[in-house]
Amino acid sequence: MSHTADPALRIEHLTAGYARGPVLFEVSATIPRGQVTAILGPNGSGKSTLLGVLAGTVTPDRGTIHRDTARRPAFVVQHTAVPTTLPITVRDAVAMGRWAHRGPWRRLTREDRAITHDCLERMNLADLATRRLDTLSGGQRQRTLLAQALAQQSDLLLLDEPATGLDTDSKAEISRTLTEISATGVTVVQATHDLAEARRADHCLVLREGHLTAAGQPGEALVGA
């Protein structure tokens, strides 16, 4: 099967940025459904901006995004973006993923609690459910944020540098988890500057200074990267 035969997202002539000016220039690409796509590039290449456009938080200056997905995307920030002093438990943090369906601070239903429990189990966090976030390691916090995203039950998962700052074992665990998630039909898109992480993906987009320089399977797109 071709990696682009059934795209979940089609990006056409995308130019996007902020008040100071464009960051992405004329980017056109497809993102295959139910696979892991890595957006590879150095800092400042436009990875986070592209994720923001896909998430709907950054408005393009020009171009279009065609989404063939059924639900709002679930966005996973870096674990370092979450205040370590946030006085909530792991279970509370994961349950917040259900707000996408219930609205903030609404009472959770039995179904919400069951989904939260399933996501804790899936990310091997059940034993840490009553621990506060500020007592966790970086890898445990990142797994908690992944579980929170899974609780949204989206078919599009967007991650901004999920392995940054983690040890080798935690990086490998996050990578395995993303592969398992995509195997259930979820489209996974992660920004990374880690070449080894990009090689583990099914599909790659390579950005440099806001321009798409290569796209395709890792063995093709990462030649010379």
Image: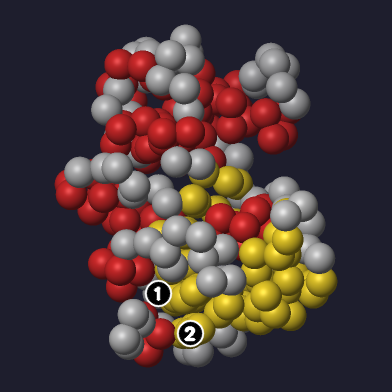
- Sequence-wise, which precedes: disc 2 or disc 1? 1
Looking at this view, name the residue that lies furthest to the top: 87
Residue 185 shows which numbered tag?
Answer: none
Kindly identify the amino acid type of the residue bearing the numbered disc 1: Asp
Kindly identify the amino acid type of the residue bearing the numbered disc 2: Ala
Residue 194: image quadrant is: bottom left
| Element assignment for label 2 | strand
Quadrant containing the C terminus in the rendered view: bottom left
Residue 146: x and y, percent? 45, 41
Residue 200: x and y, percent? 30, 69
Note whether 80 is above or below 44 in the view shown. above
The reply to whether residue 90 is visible in this rendering is yes
Depth check, front residue: 140 or 46: 46
| Element assignment for label 1 | loop
The residue positioned 39% from the left and 56% from the top of the image is 178
Q: Give the side of residue 201 with respect to residue 47, left or right.
A: left
What is the number of callouts on the image? 2
Residue under circle 2? 214
Depth check, front residue: 48 or 132: 48
Residue under circle 1? 202
Note whether 150 is above or below 221 in the view shown. above
